[in-house]
Image (cartoon, grey):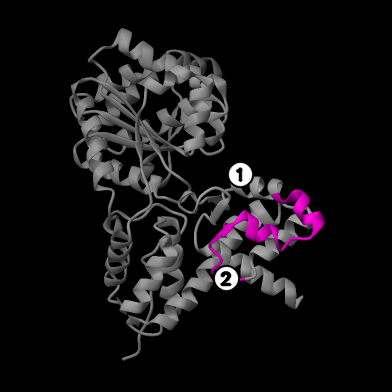
Amino acid sequence: MSFVKESSPFTPGNPVPIELFVGRGEQINEARQYINQSIYGRLENIFLVGERGIGKSSLASFLRFLTTKDNFLSVYVSSGGITDVEELVRRILEQILTEIYRESDMKDKLASLFKKKVGYIQQVGILGISISFNPPKSDLEYMVKNFPDTIKELWEKIKDKKKAIFIVLDDINGLSRNQRFADWYKSFVDNVSIRYPGQLPVVILVIGLPEIRDSMVRGQPSLMRVFRVIRIDRLTDSEVEEFFKIAFKSIGMKVEKKAMETMVMFSSGLPILMHEIGDAIFWQATDEIVDEKEALNGIYEAADRVGKKYLDPKVYSAIRSKRYRSILRKLGKRPLFVSFKKSDIESKLNANEKKVFTNFLRKMRELGVIIPDKEEGRGSYRFANMLYPIYIWMENQRFSKS
């Protein structure tokens, strides 16, 4: 019987499915301590911080799954593209209303609450399980200004059915640069503590990069004391291996030892790469067992995908300087050139390239392509992951041929 592939278990670019979630035990336990305290009427503010592709959204999704099982009203709000507080509040309320409307014994209470006021809830989507929430501008401004009252009024309608409200705010990049957002959030927290002490069981989990949190703190220094910060680091090799074993086993496949070692090494402990690599290898496999050759072919395919997704738009398309591109090609002469010293590369540059090399390194750091290699000492750098240098090498080969 021939081997037939149907659907990949990997989800590049999306949070990991709950059944494939591995690791993060320490962070989960810490988060649940804070989440459980909210049951007693406390507003808890958590900032989940970590580098790009490290699995922040996947961990938040898993926490939402756990809180839903614990009878929380749990919602996820993507803040991507939002730059003003009004749209953020509208989306938060829309998601809360959508979750409530999915439970028929609760929606009548809520419908009467808003219908009596302004009548701006509309049911949309399949079977009416989604909500379009578009209040008039004046009413939305009132809700922004009096957000503690709005959330409290909602809570009073559902408190006999739910333990607490759990809100995930993801991708707050645009908002973090808005001084008004920092001021509004701080005001919200202060007003809840003054007006509703022990009466509002809400958890707000904000997801962001380290520089995003720093930006918020600079804008409103007292925010530092508001958030409980949970940091997540790269997964260990054993956790990465466990993930691949579970994922391939779920579709009846196995991975040879050498192939697994290759997959783990090139994943760099980053879930975003684990899914790209796993998916590429899945489509390379010709039978139920993944061998080393298929793993290596999958690594090259994954590197090409990752490069086109992340390096092309922010590096190759953004950099117009011929000298910068020339330096980049010299960095890409070897596919596994992961770590390097500034002095070693500088010795290979011409006079014009040397003039801009320091600026080039700074630009690459800003774009998240390279990071300082503290273990190797001052003046040492390494690529943010092991697929970047492979793609740069591949681009170098394509340039040489053309």
Give the residue furthest to the right. 352
Q: What stretch is highlighted in magenta?
A: 334-357
Residue 134 at least partly seen: no
User: With 76 as the anchor, is 83 left or right in this view?
Assistant: right
Whole-percent x, y for residue 214 in the image = 49, 30
354 and 257: which one is in front?
354
261 part of magenta stretch: no
Q: Which residue is drawn at 66% across and 60% down?
A: 345
Q: Which of marks 1 and 2 is nearer the N terminus?
A: 2
Whole-percent x, y for residue 189 in the image = 37, 17
Residue under numbered circle 1: 366
Residue 203 at least partly seen: yes
Regarding mark 1 in the picture, which secondary structure is present there? Answer: helix
| Dot 1 amino acid type | Glu
Considering only vertical position in the picture, is 147 above or below 246? above
Considering only vertical position in the picture, is 337 above or below 97? below
Q: Are marks 1 and 2 in contact (CB under 8 Å)?
A: no
Considering only vertical position in the picture, is 89 above or below 57? above
343 part of magenta stretch: yes
Considering only vertical position in the picture, is 381 above or below 242? above
Q: Residue at x 77, y 56 (%)?
A: 353
Whole-percent x, y for residue 225 in the image = 37, 20
Residue 331 occupies quadrant? bottom right
Residue under numbered circle 2: 335
Whole-percent x, y for residue 334 in the image = 60, 71
279 and 373: which one is in front?
373
Q: Residue at x 37, y 82 (%)?
A: 291
| Dot 2 amino acid type | Pro
Rounded to the nearest angstrom, the CA distance separating label 1 from label 2 is 22 Å
User: With 209 as the anchor, is 240 left or right in this view?
Assistant: left
Say few, some or many: other residues with alpha carbon within 10 Å of mark 2 (under 14 / 14 to 19 / 20 or more): some
